[in-house]
Image: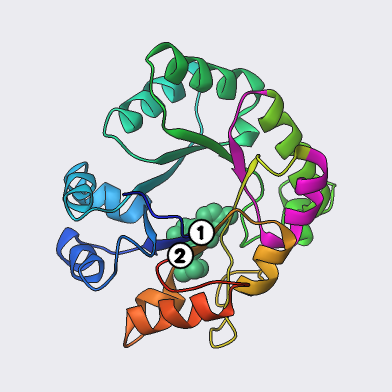
Amino acid sequence: MPTASPLIIALDYASLDAALCMADRLDPSRCRLKVGKELFTRSGPDVIDALHGRGFEIFLDLKFHDIPNTVAGAVQAAAEQGVWMVNVHASGGRRMMTAARERLDNQGLATHLIAVTVLTSMETADLAEVGVEASAADQVERLAALARDSGMDGVVCSAQEASRLRAHCGEDFLKVTPGIRPSFAVAGDQRRVMTPADAMAAGSTHLVVGRPVTQAEEPMAALAAIERELPGAEPGY
Ligand SMILES: O=c1ccn([C@@H]2O[C@H](COP(=O)(O)O)[C@@H](O)[C@H]2O)c(=O)[nH]1
């Protein structure tokens, strides 16, 4: 039974064993899991099979960014592993995103396909250094509109932009927001952050949380504390 929880826990680990130890402390009825570049590069598809076997839905966060044909093939490969969600970089452009969309549709693959706008570790000054003169919020809005027009199901953005995107791209357009920092957590390398409650109120559809849960002594207690911060939330969501 798929969970209705908006929580996605990031499993950023350097080995399959370490990731599975954490997964075994979490509850698939109360969160999804995110597999990113470090873990997937170490473990390959085995981690996906192992987490599916434990009942979790998986966001495979590999942020594909390449020429259209290559990204379409990578997205197909991810979706054929049965993952719930996969992503590409919106800055790869319209033809890249459209190729990925068409490949999933032509193959009858229902995996959610979303696009990263501006990393939550970046702020406006970081964008200027890479030649983007817009503010982070304006660049997110621009890339989100391109992603929507290119057939994406939603975007990765910070919760700080969620309300703006809700107004421009609609309620149904997914707003998957990392940079979530509950009241008990430190920001670390994240720059555009928000608490779980504020993120949900702003229009985030899914909250990505890593270290505040995975580095807690009691991960399920940390997850429960986040659930308590969510408006109207109850454990088991
Ligand atoms: O813009 C982005 C895109 C992806 N991420 C990923 O989310 C988690 C966040 O982990 P925390 O420990 O809660 O900071 C991590 O896996 C990132 O790779 C992101 O943070 N920002």
Mark 1 highlights which residue? Answer: 6
Is 28 displayed left or right of 148 in the figure? Answer: left
Query: Can you say whether 4 is above or below 147 in the image?
Result: below
Which segment did they paint magenta? 150-168
Position of residue 75 measured from the top left corner of the image (x, y, whole percent): 40, 28
Q: Is mark 1 within 8 Å of ligand 1?
A: no
Mark 2 highlights which residue? Answer: 237
Q: Nearer the viewer, residue 171 or 98?
A: 171
Position of residue 33 measured from the top left corner of the image (x, y, whole percent): 36, 57
What residue do we see at 70% from left, 71% from top?
198
Position of residue 30 measured from the top left corner of the image (x, y, whole percent): 38, 65
Q: Nearer the viewer, mark 2 or mark 1?
A: 2
Q: Badge 2: how crowded within 10 Å, few (<14), some, or many (20+)? A: some
Query: Can you say whether 143 is above or below 97 in the image?
Result: below
Q: CA distance from mark 2 to mark 1?
A: 8 Å
Q: Badge 1: how crowded within 10 Å, few (<14), some, or many (20+)? A: many
Give the number of marks. Answer: 2
Q: Nearer the viewer, residue 35 or 82?
A: 82
Where disc 1 sits, the SS reads: loop
Type of residue at label 2? Tyr
What residue do we see at 59% from left, 73% from top?
230
Q: Quadrant of the C terminus?
A: bottom left
Type of residue at label 1? Pro
Q: Is residue 18 magenta?
A: no
Q: Mark 2 touching mark 1, by CB under 8 A?
A: yes
Is 71 displayed left or right of 141 in the figure? Answer: left
Position of residue 67 measured from the top left corner of the image (x, y, whole percent): 51, 21
